[in-house]
Image (spheres, helix red, strand yellow):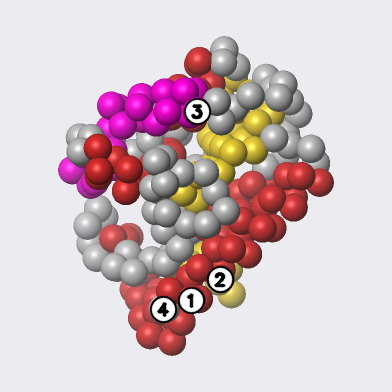
C-alpha cells in the first residue's frame, strides 16, 4: 500500500498518556513510531477516555484522508458514547454535546479535577451513568455496540479507498491482535512497565511497533 501519512485513532493508549508528550498527542506511541519507520507524516485524533462510539465519531468527522493510512485501536467495549440533549463545558474548556460514559469513570470520582467532577454531577451525568449501566451494562450489549462501530468504520474507509489497520485494547473479534491478545492484555503478559495510571510506557510501544513490522501487517 502507498501512503504519505499515518493517522491514528483510539483512546488514551493511542494519544500516549503518561509518555510525557501526550498533548496534543505523543510521538512515541506505536502508530507514531510506525510513521517514523516508514518515513511518513503522523497525526492522531485519539483522546483520553474515548468510547468506541467516540472513536467512530472522530473518524467520520476527520476531513483530510488524502494519501493517508489509518491505524485504529478500539477501546474497552464497556465505554458508551452519547450525544447529550444539551451543551456542557468539557474538561478541555470546550463546548460539546458528546460524553463518553464508562464504568467507574474517573472524571466522576474526583481523581483529577474536583471542580470538573462536581460540574458533571451538577448536570446529572453520574445519575445518567448509573442508570445506563444498571439497565444496559452487559457484555452482549457492549460487544454488539462495538461490532456496529467496527463494521460502520470498515464500510466508511473501504468506500473511500482508505487503507486501515485495526487493533484492540482488549481482545475482540474482527481486528488484528498481538499474539492473539489486545494491546493491554499483551503488555500485561509481557510485563512491560506501566505508568501511575496504568498506561503502557515506551518499551511497550516500541515492542508493538516492531511486532507490526515483523509480522508485515503493513505491506
Question: Is residue 10 at all visible to an observer of this figure?
Answer: no
The image position of residue 206, as x and y in percent, is 36, 24
Q: Are marks 4 and 1 in contact (CB under 8 Å)?
A: no
Dividing the image into 4 quarters, which one contains the C terminus? Answer: top right
Distance in Å between CA atoms under marks 4 and 2? 12 Å
Proximity of marks 1 and 3: CB atoms separated by less than 8 Å: no
Q: Which residue is disc 3 drawn over? A: 215
Q: Nearer the viewer, mark 4 or mark 1?
A: 1
Which residue position is annotated with label 1? 140
Place of residue 209 in the rendered image (x, y in percent of width and height, measured from the top left)? 43, 26
Front-most of residues 144 and 132: 144
Q: CA distance from mark 1 to mark 3?
A: 32 Å
Dot placed on the residue nearer the N-terminal end, 2 or 3: 2
Residue placed under numbered mark 2 in the picture: 144
In the rendered structure, which segment of residues is drawn in magenta?
Answer: 194-215
- Which of disc 3 and disc 1 is earlier in sequence? 1
Return the residue at label 4. Answer: 137
As drawn, 184 above or below 134? above
Q: Nearer the viewer, residue 131 or 107?
A: 131
Q: CA distance from mark 4 to mark 3?
A: 36 Å
Which circle, 4 or 3, is nearer the viewer?
A: 3
Q: Quadrant of residue 70?
A: top right
User: Marks 2 and 1, how far apart in space?
Assistant: 6 Å
Amino acid at each position: 500500500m502507498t501512503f504519505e501519512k499515518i493517522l491514528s485513532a483510539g483512546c488514551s493508549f493511542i494519544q500516549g498518556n503518561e509518555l510525557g508528550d501526550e498533548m496534543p498527542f505523543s510521538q512515541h506511541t506505536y502508530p507514531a513510531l510506525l510513521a517514523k519507520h516508514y518515513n511518513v507524516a503522523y497525526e492522531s485524533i485519539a483522546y483520553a477516555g474515548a468510547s468506541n462510539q467516540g472513536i467512530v465519531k472522530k473518524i467520520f468527522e476527520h476531513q483530510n484522508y488524502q494519501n493517508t493510512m489509518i491505524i485504529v485501536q478500539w477501546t474497552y467495549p464497556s465505554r458508551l458514547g452519547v450525544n447529550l440533549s444539551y451543551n456542557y463545558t468539557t474538561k478541555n474548556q470546550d463546548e460539546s454535546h458528546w460524553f463518553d460514559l464508562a464504568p467507574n469513570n474517573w472524571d466522576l470520582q474526583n481523581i483529577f479535577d474536583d471542580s470538573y467532577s462536581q460540574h458533571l454531577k451538577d448536570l446529572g451525568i453520574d445519575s445518567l451513568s448509573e442508570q445506563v449501566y444498571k439497565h444496559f451494562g452487559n457484555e452482549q450489549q457492549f460487544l454488539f455496540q462495538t461490532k456496529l462501530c467496527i463494521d460502520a468504520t470498515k464500510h466508511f474507509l473501504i468506500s473511500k479507498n482508505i487503507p486501515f489497520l485495526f487493533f484492540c485494547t482488549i481482545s475482540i473479534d474482527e481486528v488484528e491482535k498481538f499474539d492473539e491478545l489486545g494491546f493491554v492484555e499483551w503488555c500485561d503478559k509481557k510485563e512491560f512497565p506501566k505508568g501511575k495510571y496504568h498506561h503502557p510506557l515506551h518499551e511497550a510501544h516500541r515492542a508493538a511497533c516492531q511486532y507490526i513490522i515483523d509480522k508485515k501487517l503493513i505491506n
